Image: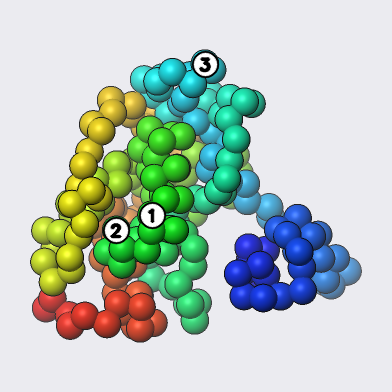
């Protein structure tokens, strides 16, 4: 279980660190061949060292300045899910539809730190130190897509305000290895909406 859930759902651990350590200790010794730890996307940012603006490109050469403090930690993975609940990552993307201010603040913090929001389908994830994202867009672009494709949803006007930053996605390491993304932005966002509906998070009628 993701450590943050231990906090939100009333488990016995006091914080994320304690929950993470306990989770690792509970792994069966001798039965696990490999443990993959995924770091937050906030470890990498095109934010300039003085915090004043962004570099032109976001790639693996970017490291977040050490003086930047993170109240949140998140990465944006969406698409169809086998989980019985909506993950925090998907909840961030869906906050533009649900109006959940807590998750909206998290995705906006990510945008303010990185310039835009990198998103990837769960089936397009990749092992290794790579910036893995099929799309790099602003929250306003995401909100605009939701508004156009799903007019039955009420999109808060503030979600549509776009700062129009010029920073671009510059990572090609995965493609140089022959990796091809199978899911674009539209497919990812549509599957996230569909999954949320199946889980009862979005109870509006289907748009057909």
Say few, some or many: other residues with alpha carbon within 10 Å of mark 1 (under 14 / 14 to 19 / 20 or more): many
The residue depicted at 44 percent of the width and 42 percent of the height is 109
Task: Judge the density around disc 2: few (<14), some (14-19), many (≥20) Cα neighbours within 10 Å.
Answer: many
**What separation in Å lies between label 3 and label 2 (alpha carbons)?**
30 Å
Could you say which quadrant of the image residue 49 lies in? top right
Question: Taking the image as drawn, is residue 70 in sight?
Answer: yes
Q: Position of residue 186 (x, y in %)?
A: 23, 57
Residue in the image at 29% along x and 41% along y = 138
Res. 50 mark: 3
Which residue is under mark 1? 104
Q: Do the numbered discs 2 and 1 sit on residues whose CB atoms are within 8 Å?
A: yes
User: Would you call the spot at circle 3 few (<14 residues within 10 Å), some (14-19), or many (20 or more)?
Assistant: few
> On the picture, is 127 further left or further right than 142?
right
**Label 2 to label 1: alpha-carbon separation:** 7 Å
Asked if the residue at tag 2 contacts the one at tag 3, i.e. Cβ–Cβ closer than 8 Å, the answer is no
**Residue 133's x, y, as percent?**
41, 45
What residue did someone put label 2 on? Answer: 96
Report the front residue among 11 and 124: 11
User: Which secondary structure, mark 2?
Assistant: helix
Up the image or down, 168 lies above or below 36; here it is: above
Report the residue at 70% width, 58% height from top. Answer: 16
Q: Is residue 34 visible?
A: no
Q: Position of residue 70 (x, y in %)?
A: 58, 40
Give the quadrant of residue 136.
Answer: top left
**SS state under label 3:** loop
């Amino acid at each position: 279980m993701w450590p943050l859930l231990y906090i939100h759902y009333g488990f016995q651990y006091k914080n994320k660190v304690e929950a993470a350590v306990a989770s690792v200790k509970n792994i069966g010794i001798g039965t696990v061949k490999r443990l993959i730890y995924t770091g937050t996307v906030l470890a990498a940012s095109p934010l300039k060292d003085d915090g004043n603006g962004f570099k032109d490109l976001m790639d693996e050469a970017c490291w977040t300045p050490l003086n930047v403090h993170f109240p949140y930690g998140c990465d944006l993975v969406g698409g169809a899910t086998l989980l019985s609940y909506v993950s925090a990552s998907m909840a961030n993307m869906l906050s533009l539809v649900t109006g959940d201010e807590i998750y909206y603040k998290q995705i906006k913090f990510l945008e303010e730190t990185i310039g835009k929001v990198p998103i990837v389908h769960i089936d397009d994830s990749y092992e290794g130190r790579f910036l893995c994202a099929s799309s790099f867009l602003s929250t306003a672009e995401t909100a605009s897509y939701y508004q156009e494709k799903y007019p039955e949803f009420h999109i808060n006007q503030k979600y549509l305000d776009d700062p129009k930053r010029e920073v671009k996605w510059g990572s090609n390491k995965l493609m140089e290895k022959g990796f091809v993304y199978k899911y674009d932005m539209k497919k990812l966002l549509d599957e996230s909406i569909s999954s949320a509906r199946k889980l009862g998070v979005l109870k509006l009628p289907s748009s057909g």
